[in-house]
Image (tube, rainbow, N blue to C red):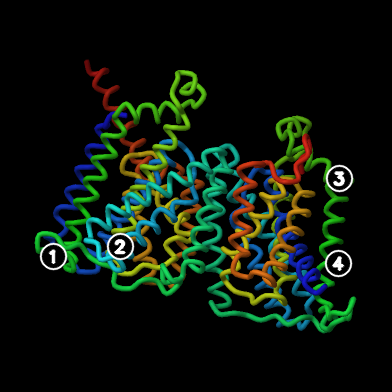
Amino acid sequence: MKLSKFDILFGLCLAFIGLLLPFSNPRETLIQLITLAAIWSIFAIGFDFVFGSLGMISFGHATFLGVGGYALSLATQKYGLPFMAGVGLAIFLGAVFALLFSFFALRVSGIFFALVTLALSQLVFILADSKLRSFTGGSDGILGVERPSLLGIDFFDPINFYWFVLAIYTLVMLAVISLRSSPFGRVIAAIRNNEIRADQLGFNVNRYKQITFVISGALSGLAGALLASLLMYMNPQMLHWTTSGDVIIMTLLGGSGTLWGATVGVIAFEFLKEWLSSWTEYWYGVLGMIFILVTIFVPRGIVGELERMYSTRQKRLDLRQRRAK
Amino acid sequence: MSTIVIGLSLGMLLFLLAAGLTLIFGMLGVINFAHGAIYMLGAYVSFEVGKQTGSFLMGVIAAITITGVLGAAVEKLSLRPLYERPHFYQLILTFGLILVLSDVVRYIWGSGYQEVSIPPLWNGTVDMLGSTIPVYRLFVIGLGVVVSTLLYLFLEKSTFGMLVRAASSDAEMVRILGLPVGTIRMAVFSIGCALSGLAGAIAAPLFPVELGMATNTIIDCFIVVILGGLGNIRGAIAASLMVGMVRALGYVYMPSWVDILTFSLLILTLLTRPQGLFFRAARSA
């Protein structure tokens, strides 16, 4: 897929906001919120890499996020590894777990794919929560997860940490854009359009799905490490299957399968959450209601709907120009 | 002996839950993630009505009615527009429903535990083969047997059951014959939810009534339904009894491995026999 004009315009808008934000003298909570959204965006982009581009719905992504979080927390705290090595380990283990899951889950399709990934990820949750308590700290979690220490910059300062996360987010976005337009991305799109045709053309469909899933797991692992670092706390709740549900809500809210949908969905989710929770403690229920309405009436999501409006407007302008000639 | 009774009663409860879930899947092709939330709602309703009226039976009836009506409303208002879309939309919609139901329950009853006492009529123990058995457990087993028999007769022998089976194998044809497929689907969803509400009401005296029921129970349900084969009611009976027994025995002999064993069994089944352990060819509903 080539970048459309819409994608570029939208990206420039987001970049503009993202770059100017720290200079607008924002409140600390706002910076924290945007940092959180950027991290969740990396997770949602990773999730949508499987869901949006292949149409496979995974209920196991909480595992990859959680494994990433634990990898960083344990590597830096228990084994004294430097922060970046911990992040590397998180990415690596996210990919390894995705690979393990794919051996099981890719043998089935449709709704069974969702159920197998759900079962596997609950198994990991139970292991981390009870069986491996001595290693993971059980439900008490791990306190005081590291922040990065690079070039002598103080990353406990929210704005500096924001820059760090924004840089990583930009790298992830660039990687995803180039992957989408690469030959690999074209094959994935072909599989999504017609799996049997892609197979008949001689592509190893299962291998391509597996690679997609592993990349998705690696991105989720990265997001997990950053999330643990932002919160400076890690607990098994990140591994619970409802976390997978959250990321699905975010992705659909923004518009699955679009370039910026995951990011916009996360931002919408986080701001709705902030706003709703300021006037009711039952924000999660209200959010659920909004989500149900979105599923029924706006299945394309926010970005999908904007994209459609943009393209119909473009077509109308085209038509008018041609008539004028 | 008492372990066996506990296992059987647990199995029967699981069956009440799984029957609804598997019925809905067999008929509508929808995996209802909110099934556990409806079970929770059933338990809370029976707690509240039981407390107000002082009658356990009234609580059970209220739980069935409210969850049944809720099921019908959910089907009509939210699922019906989605049948033409890819499967995952329905899956995701019912996930949203969990969030809504959980917070509605939290709004009404708060987030603490609630206790329901065993109704006096069934409160007691009997001696069987040298061990003491709570009567209520026997009642649950009996009820499970009755409900499963009724469900079987309903689906296999009644005209409406025939319609349900016909609509699940070829909805388009049934529609062309001039029968209201939409209403049949709504009724099935409603019955499935009412079964879950019944399970919640029956389970209320056995377990603490709490919010965690919504997300924990659904996983148990999935295990049973997958082991039994999605959409296969007979399979669900066998699978729920099996899981019930494994749970009961496991808690006695190796408590910390129960969950891990059940999940491993589940994953193994999904991989080797995705159609379920008790699958017989050309048989659905």
* Residue on which disc 2 sits: A75
Residue occupying the point 66% across, 64% down: B39
Q: What residue type is labelled 2?
A: Ala
Please check whether the numbered discs 4 and 2 fall on a single chain. Answer: no
Residue B142 disc label: 4
* Residue on which disc 3 sits: B156
Q: How far apart are labels 4 and 2 at the CA level?
A: 54 Å
Q: How far apart are labels 1 and 4 at the CA level?
A: 68 Å
Q: How far apart are labels 2 and 1 at the CA level?
A: 35 Å
Q: What residue type is labelled 3?
A: Glu
Label 4: chain letter: B
Left or right: residue A190 compared with residue A156: right
Left or right: residue B11 compared with residue A54: right
Disc 3 or disc 4, which is closer to the eye? 4
- B152 or A15, which lies in front? B152
Q: How far apart are labels 3 and 4 at the CA level?
A: 21 Å
Please check whether the numbered discs 1 and 4 fall on a single chain. Answer: no
Disc 1 or disc 4, which is closer to the eye? 4
Residue B254 position in % (x across, y down)? 64, 69
Mark 3: secondary structure: helix
Please check whether the numbered discs 3 and 1 fall on a single chain. Answer: no
